[in-house]
Amino acid sequence: MGRLPISARAMRSTRLLRTVSSSAKVAQAVAMQAQSASSHPPNSVPQHTPPLPPPPLSRTRAPSNAQMSFPCLDVLEDRTRSFDTGPEPTYSRNLTGFEVYHSSQPLRLDNGGILREFDIAYETWGHLNEDKSNAIIIHTGLSASSHAHSHTKNPAPGWWEKFIGPGCAIDTNRFFVICTNVIGGCYGSSGPSSIDPADGERYATRFPIITVDDMTRAQHRLFTEQFGISKLHASVGASMGGMQSLSFGTQFPESVGRIVSISGCARSHPYSIAMRHTQRQVLMADPNWRRGFYYDSVPPHAGMKLAREIATITYRSGPEWEQRFGRRRADPRKLPALCADFLIETYLDHQGEKFCLEYDANSLLYVSKAMDLFDLSLSTRQKAIDTRAALYVADADTVPCALPRSPYKEQPEVVADIPRQLNFDEAREDLVAGMGPLRETPVFVLGVESDILFPSWQQKEIVDVLRDSGNTKVEHVELGSDVSVYGHDTFLLSVKEVGAPVKEFLEKDF
């Protein structure tokens, strides 16, 4: 068959398309195409042929697979809707029975900020003796409250319930025990969710950056002013509490008889800083965070949940999870899902879900940043002392701390107004000098081999630095993986392995 002229082919196409669709728009488009084609000489191609619309899809066609369901996202969305018209959740709703110490004197901070006045929540167990020499402070980890042990005002189990009490590692028959919620927290102490006395509004992210040393200076004021205690029998803490314990000793060596630091460090190292940075970034990426001003609206619980899941990975160890969960799935009868499916996933999901509405998001940001900034080196402490002194000279109880609005940029190694970075040996000498105030204080250090957040070499660094400073009263215990596979959380779970050596040290005569 010979090749039809363009005009004939266009008319044939028109007839075929009319059998596919009776749409007036389709017929009109094809007719226009035919008219355009007939106006050109044979063998020429129209330059602006309008595209033909595709044939309509049949309504009976179905996708190859059913759409995946996402119950984990449904939960988040439902929770968000539940707070659209309700009040902000009370993060301390399950806590009762704590006392509050109020200081009306300003607390000038290491990085230039100020708290014109502040509160510290605390709880006590045991009895203070006549000469006030049997007091022990328990320092908390990042997210813990002052409720370390149950008592008549709050019979709920505390976070260190089995370690405190008559005959326990911290024997309340012998010692008067105090536990505080740190400044920056959200369980009764002044923090971002507190009211700024200057304007009657919540601080939110107008709360100043704090350090671990700031926390312990506030605690020192509590002991001396509220209880009239001039010297503690001991300062005890684990994780961030281990940092606080060492901080208290270096700032107030004359005010403490002995130090216990469990799973802590003398300075924060890059890995733990990186993990906490990741948690903060996830949290701040939640659109409900609103740069910290979320208190009258929906809280950033999705970001909080994910941040806690990341943190939980660093709190425990792989070997424990291998034994506990393995590769088992929550429900092997069902097809795999993108939501929590393996047992380890459901465990992380539960931990994040439980935490996300109990703790203030801004407190997580501020307290974790204080951990990152922790460094007992002499140069760091001297810089903080100089900063606080400048606030006194400037009468800075009326001047807020201002931060630059432009993004931070990495600076070259040598800049005129930036101190030179110390090399490894110089940094070590700086740390030895910074921990020098503890050279006469008995110190007990405990580490855990399976800890990935504060690896055992960081506790060994504390021991070596103290001994290099001249301290001959340093005791060191490391729990191997044959004893504990709980990782960083060992201090919460291994009552015998942690509690027994701590008890011996606290009750020893020096």
Image (cartoon, rainbow, N blue to C red):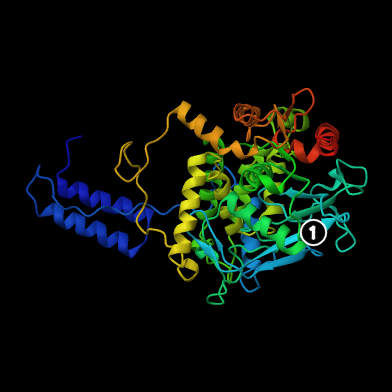
Instruction: Tell which residue pokes out farthest to the left in this image.
Output: 41
Q: Amino acid at mark 1?
A: Glu
- In this rendering, the answer to whether 172 lies above or below 509 is below
Does residue 66 appear anywhere in the picture? yes
Tell me the element at label 1.
strand
> 69 or 151: which is nearer to us?
151
- In this rendering, the answer to whether 468 lies above or below 436 is above
Q: Position of residue 283 (x, y in %)?
A: 55, 53
- In this rendering, the answer to whether 143 lies above or below 428 is below
> 82 or 159: which is nearer to us?
159
Q: Position of residue 404 (x, y in %)?
A: 38, 58
Quarter of the image where the C terminus is located: top right
- In this rendering, the answer to whether 219 lies above or below 165 is below
Q: Position of residue 181 (x, y in %)?
A: 70, 57
Q: Is residue 221 left or right of residue 7?
A: right
Q: Which residue is mark 1?
A: 123
Labels in figure, total: 1
Q: Position of residue 436 (x, y in %)?
A: 59, 36
